Structure formats: structure tokens, C-alpha cells
Amino acid sequence: MLLFALLILALAFTISSYIFKKGVLAFAGAGAWIIASIHCFSVSIATWDTYFSLAFLFIALLLACIFSPLAWRETTADNETPEEPDVRDLREEMEAFSRERNQYAFLRGKQPRRRTRW
């Protein structure tokens, strides 16, 4: 019964981590797979035992859970990042203001600022 409970717990964490794409759930699933594999190693009597084989299967699932958050990460270039319309409008206003301020910077005797700080 303990092995059955550990399997349900580990599967619940693993499946929920894939659904919600949360690394914390993936690492919790990895912990549950570790506990399940330790339990199988401690219960196994010989190297040909079913529990011994299950322990190695759980170790493979443990590795899959540990490295799964790396597969969820999306990488895009800065110009490919999707923006909401409100954020884009605000950014364009700030850039226009910065250009206009830099255009008349010589009147103040200062060099134009290169970056806009939010």
C-alpha cells in the first residue's frame, strides 16, 4: 500500500507539473520519485526482484522530472517578445518624449541621455 500511495503522489506531482509548467511541482515530483525508489530498494530481496527493477524505473522518471523544466523554457529575441497594446503605447510615448528631450539637450548644456530609465 505504501508503494501504491507513493506512486499516486509522484504521478500527481509529475502530471500537474507538465500541465501547469511549474518547476516547483516538477522538483516535488522528483522528490516523490526518489522516495519511491528508496522504498523499492529497501523492500527488494534480490537483484532479480520486481521491486529492484521498479527502483531503476523510478530513477529514470526522477531524471525526467528534474530536467523537464528545461524543456518548458521559451527563448525569444528582444524584438520578438509579444507586447500588450497598452504597454507598447506607453513605451512609444516614453521613447518619443526621450527623443524630444534629447533634441533640445544642447540648450541645457548637457549631453543627451542614451537610455530611458523607467
Image: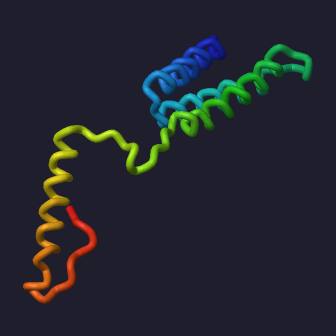
Locate residue 64, reporting x and y percent: 65, 30
Q: Residue at x 52, y 18 (%)?
A: 12
- Given residues 59 and 52, the one toward you in this image is 59
- Given residues 75 and 79, the one toward you in this image is 79
What kind of colouring is applied to the model shown?
Answer: rainbow
User: In the visual, does 55 lie left or right of 88?
Assistant: right
- Given residues 109 and 25, the one toward you in this image is 109
Locate residue 3, reporting x and y percent: 66, 16
User: In the visual, does 15 lie left or right of 45?
Assistant: left
Q: Residue at x 21, y 78 (%)?
A: 112
Locate residue 36, reporting x and y percent: 67, 24
Q: Residue at x 51, y 24 (%)?
A: 18
Q: Quadrant of the N terminus?
A: top right
In the rendered image, the vertical position of residue 53 relative to residue 76, given as above or below:
above
Q: Quadrant of the C terminus?
A: bottom left
Furthest residue to the bottom?
109
Locate residue 105, reporting x and y percent: 13, 80
In the rendered image, the vertical position of residue 24 relative to residue 93, given as above or below:
above
- Given residues 88 and 15, the one toward you in this image is 88
Q: Residue at x 77, y 21 (%)?
A: 43
